[in-house]
């Protein structure tokens, strides 16, 4: 899951700071999500899903299909 959120961010050419601003958290908190040092709350997972246009299942690694159908 942690690698996927990093890969999604990089695929969208965004910085951690930019994503953190969209999620209303600090860059450090977001960095901890990417490093797996902090669990990602459900509301943040939903925001990331909407931001990237992928399913929460994809972010969680349950599905390998990234796009919402």
Image (tube, rainbow, N blue to C red):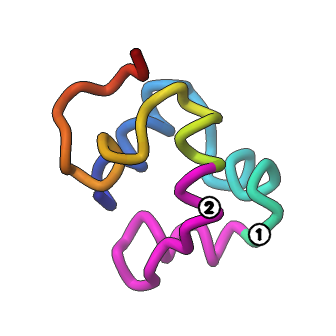
- Seen in the image, is 41 located left or right of residue 26? left
Relative depth, front residue between 3 and 40: 40
Q: Main secondary structure of the magenta part?
A: helix
Relative depth, front residue between 15 and 19: 19
According to the picture, the residue beneath numbered tag 2 turns out to be 44
Q: Quadrant of residue 63?
A: top left
Q: In percent of the image, x 75 and y 72: which residue is there?
A: 26
Q: Are marks 2 and 1 in contact (CB under 8 Å)?
A: yes
Asked if residue 54 lies in the magenta stretch, the reply is no
- Seen in the image, is 34 located left or right of residue 66? right
SS at badge 1 = loop
Residue 52: x %, y % from top left: 55, 30
SS at badge 2 = helix
Q: Is 3 placed above or below 68 here?
A: below
Q: Is 65 placed above or below 38 here?
A: above
Q: Which residues are magenta?
A: 27-46
Q: Quadrant of the C terminus?
A: top left
According to the picture, the residue beneath numbered tag 1 turns out to be 25
Q: In percent of the image, x 46 and y 34: which residue is there?
A: 10
- Seen in the image, is 68 located left or right of residue 31? left
Q: Tell which circle, 2 or 1, labels the residue nearer the N-terminal end.
A: 1
Q: Quadrant of residue 30?
A: bottom right
Residue 18: x %, y % from top left: 74, 46
Q: Quadrant of the N terminus?
A: bottom left
Relative depth, front residue between 15 and 43: 43
Residue 61: x %, y % from top left: 21, 50
């Amino acid at each position: 899951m942690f690698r996927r959120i990093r890969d999604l961010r990089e695929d969208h050419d965004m910085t951690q700071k930019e994503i953190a601003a969209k999620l209303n958290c600090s860059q450090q908190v977001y960095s901890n999500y990417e490093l797996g040092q902090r669990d990602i709350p459900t509301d943040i997972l939903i925001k990331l899903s909407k931001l990237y246009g992928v399913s929460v299942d994809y972010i969680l690694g349950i599905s390998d299909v990234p796009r919402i159908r």
